[in-house]
Amino acid sequence: MTSTTLSDFRAHQSKVLDDAQREPVEILSRGSRRRAVVVSPEFFDRAVQALEDQNDIRGAAEARAENGQVSHEELMAELGL
């Protein structure tokens, strides 16, 4: 990951956005405080999808670990039907 200052980002936004297409670019304020990270849309989409997949996997594991069965009435009530 490359880094740039906030003032450099303001002065060279196009270059930073181009760089972010290849790898994430962190924007620093006052030389060391991390303010933001600029990533490509593809990187962002993959990251969001990975988080959603993890959540789905975790939910499925929890469902498999549950003991007991749910009655039809309980299921309908839980789904609000």
Image (tube, helix red, strand yellow):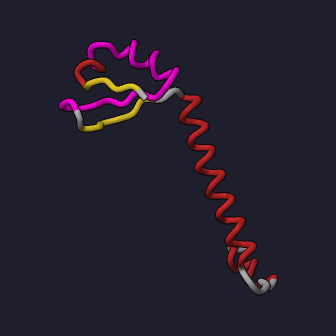
Work out whether residue 7 or residue 72 is closer to the camera in this orientation and state it: 7
* Res 48 → quadrant: top right
Look at the image and say whether residue 13 sits in the magenta stretch: yes
At 70% from the left and 68% from the top, the residue drawn is 61
| Residue range (magenta) | 10-31
Residue 74 position within the rendered picture, expressed as x and y whole percent measured from the top left: 73, 83
Q: Residue sitting at 70 percent across and 80 percent down?
A: 77
Q: Is residue 32 left or right of residue 16?
A: left
> Is 73 on the left-hand or right-hand side of 51?
right
Query: Is residue 37 inside the magenta stretch?
Result: no
Quarter the N terminus occupies: top left
Between 22 and 38, the one lying in front of the other is 22
Query: What is the tally of numbered marks visible in this picture?
Result: 0
x, y percent for residue 59: 66, 65
Name the residue rendered at 46%, 23% in the picture. Answer: 20
Residue placed farthest to the front in the image? 1
Quarter holding residue 35: top left
Relative to 32, say whether 53 is above or below: below
Horizontal side, residue 37 vs residue 45: left or right = left
Q: Is residue 76 above or below residue 24?
A: below
Point out the image quarter for the C terminus: bottom right
Q: Residue furthest left?
A: 30
Task: Pinpoint residue 29: horizontal percent, then vertical percent.
Answer: 22, 32
Residue displayed at 29% across by 37% down: 34
Q: Position of residue 17 (x, y in %)?
A: 43, 19
